[in-house]
Image (cartoon, rainbow, N blue to C red):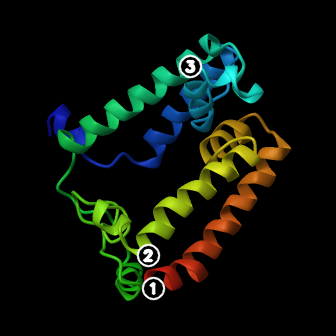
Amino acid sequence: MNLIELIKEPWPWYVAGPLIAFVFFLLSFFGRSFGVSDSLRTMCSMSGAGKKIEFFDFDWRNQIWNIIFIIGAAIGGFIATFWLSSDTPVQIHESVIANIHAMNLDAPSPYKILPESIFSFEALLTLRGFIALVLGGFLVGFGARYAGGCTSGHAISGLSNLQLPSLIAVIGFFIGGLIMAHLLLPVIMNL
């Protein structure tokens, strides 16, 4: 197996986990904390929103590294999707796939991880697509701001710094995710 084929394979937890830990060690060493939702605040500040709203009035130049990280993640995601994807299907238990089909969702495939019945421009023009994308997107953005960070900020960065508010936020994220997956999503997908 050559290096490209090795990179294309899914990475086990004992490779990906230590790599994430190493990145957060570097962030902590340089006195930084990571959170994707802070990038939106930084972009708003860069766009001049700080002249109108006090929340965005800060020196965004100190956060430019976070924007570069997000751009790098997007470029990395593009490269991984279009040039380094494996033909191996995502490993999902058959009972989960049956539940996905029962909710009128299309199951993932090697080149389609997100269900098009929710994540597509055609779905946006339907009631369930509007609820899932627009209303859901608003609630995620509002929740991330209200909680002082998103899932990556609290679950990865906050917990690695042993912060109690992050533990409370992560517990809330999981409870909300379970309610969404088991109670709300089946109703939304049958609209």
Is 46 located above or below residue 44 in the figure?
A: above
Give amino acid for label 3: Met
User: Quick check: 132 left or right of 41?
Assistant: left
Give amino acid for label 2: Leu
Mark 2–mark 3 contact, CB under 8 Å?
no
- Going 67% across and 36% down the picture, which residue do you hit? 157
* Residue 85, image x, y percentages: 21, 46
**Could you say which disc has been placed on residue 191 in the image?**
1
Specify the quadrant that holds the N terminus. Answer: top left
Q: Earlier in the sequence, mark 2 or mark 3?
A: 3
Q: Which residue is mark 2?
A: 127
Give amino acid for label 1: Leu
Mark 2–mark 1 contact, CB under 8 Å?
yes
How far apart marks 2 and 3 lie (CA) works out to 34 Å
User: Quick check: 99 left or right of 163?
Assistant: left
| Secondary structure under the numbered disc 2 in the rendered image | helix
* Residue 43, image x, y percentages: 55, 26
Is 73 located above or below residue 98 in the figure?
A: above
Specify the quadrant that holds the C terminus. Answer: bottom left
| Secondary structure under the numbered disc 1 in the rendered image | loop
- Going 50% across and 60% down the picture, which residue do you hit? 134
- Going 47% across and 48% down the picture, which residue do you hit? 13
**Could you say which disc has been placed on residue 41 in the image?**
none
Q: Earlier in the sequence, mark 2 or mark 1?
A: 2
Q: How many marks?
A: 3
How far apart marks 3 and 1 lie (CA) works out to 40 Å
| Secondary structure under the numbered disc 3 in the rendered image | helix
Q: Which residue is mark 3?
A: 46
Relative depth, front residue between 176 and 159? 176
Relative depth, front residue between 104 and 121? 121
Q: Quadrant of residue 102?
A: bottom left
* Residue 74, image x, y percentages: 37, 34
